[in-house]
């Protein structure tokens, strides 16, 4: 196992564990909301906002994780009909396009969003945390997707990936 594969596996393991923790907190949050609403007769407003932010983080980090594992949904009907050489070329093209999307939309656009919301000092409605911290997951996940794309391109070149 080379160094890039070791780093890739460690990052994926960290993402798995982090998403398990976030999902666990999300479940506890929703259970607490149901418990407080129906058994205590009172509702806490912060639980809905925490659930929304947790779901945002789970979705965006999950997209990065699935990209790293190459388990995103894909329509591969035409791809399966290509020769091995053309599959390699198309796979590299797809990874380059994913890299560019992550760079332009997620990293550059996400950093702009984070900067703007932090500069304007926008706070969440109930938890009163800066929204820039919530939105910071976007450029972070974009950076992860870019790194995963570089890793996938290198494994395609080395013939270490199943096409």
Image: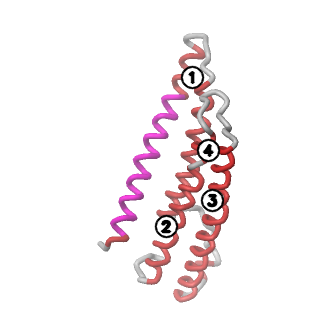
Residue where numbered disc 2 is placed: 147
- For marks 3 and 4, the one nearer the N-term is 3
Q: Using a 10 Å C-alpha cutoff, classify the residue at mark 3 as few (fewer than 14 neighbours), some (14 to 19) or many (20 or more).
A: many
**Left or right of 122, for residue 66:** left
For residue 106, the mark is 3
User: Secondary structure beneath disc 2?
Assistant: helix
Label 2 or label 4, whichever lies nearer to me, is: 4
- For marks 1 and 4, the one nearer the N-term is 1
Residue 91 coordinates in the image, percent (x, y): 56, 78
Which of the pair 109/157 is nearer the observer? 109
Residue plotted at (64% across, 67% down): 101
Dominant SS of magenta comes to: helix
In the rendered structure, are the residues bearing label 1 and label 3 in contact, judged by CB atoms less than 8 Å apart? no
User: Secondary structure beneath disc 3?
Assistant: helix
For residue 132, the mark is 4
Q: Using a 10 Å C-alpha cutoff, classify the residue at mark 2 as few (fewer than 14 neighbours), some (14 to 19) or many (20 or more).
A: some
Label 1 and label 4: CA atoms lie apart by: 25 Å
Q: Using a 10 Å C-alpha cutoff, classify the residue at mark 1 as few (fewer than 14 neighbours), some (14 to 19) or many (20 or more).
A: many
Residue plotted at (41% across, 58% down): 12
Which of the pair 63/143 is nearer the observer? 143
Residue 54 coordinates in the image, percent (x, y): 55, 39
Label 2 and label 4: CA atoms lie apart by: 23 Å
Label 1 or label 4, whichever lies nearer to me, is: 4
User: Secondary structure beneath disc 4?
Assistant: helix
Residue where numbered disc 1 is placed: 33
User: Secondary structure beneath disc 1?
Assistant: helix
Residue 2 coordinates in the image, percent (x, y): 31, 74
In the rendered structure, are the residues bearing label 3 and label 4 in contact, judged by CB atoms less than 8 Å apart? no
- For marks 2 and 3, the one nearer the N-term is 3
Q: Which residues are magenta?
A: 5-29
């Amino acid at each position: 196992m080379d160094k890039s594969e070791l780093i890739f596996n460690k990052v994926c393991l960290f993402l798995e564990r982090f998403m398990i923790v976030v999902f666990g907190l999300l479940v506890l949050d929703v259970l607490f909301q149901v418990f407080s609403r129906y058994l205590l007769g009172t509702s806490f407003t912060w639980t809905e906002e925490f659930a929304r932010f947790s779901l945002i983080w789970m979705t965006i980090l999950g997209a990065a994780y699935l990209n790293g594992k190459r388990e995103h949904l894909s329509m591969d009907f035409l791809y399966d009909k290509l020769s091995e050489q053309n599959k390699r070329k198309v796979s590299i093209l797809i990874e380059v396009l994913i890299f560019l999307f992550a760079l332009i939309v997620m990293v550059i656009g996400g950093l702009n969003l984070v900067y703007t919301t932090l500069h304007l000092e926008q706070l969440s409605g109930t938890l009163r945390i800066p929204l820039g911290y919530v939105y910071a997951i976007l450029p972070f996940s974009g950076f992860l997707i870019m790194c995963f794309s570089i890793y996938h391109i290198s494994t395609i070149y080395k013939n270490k990936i199943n096409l």
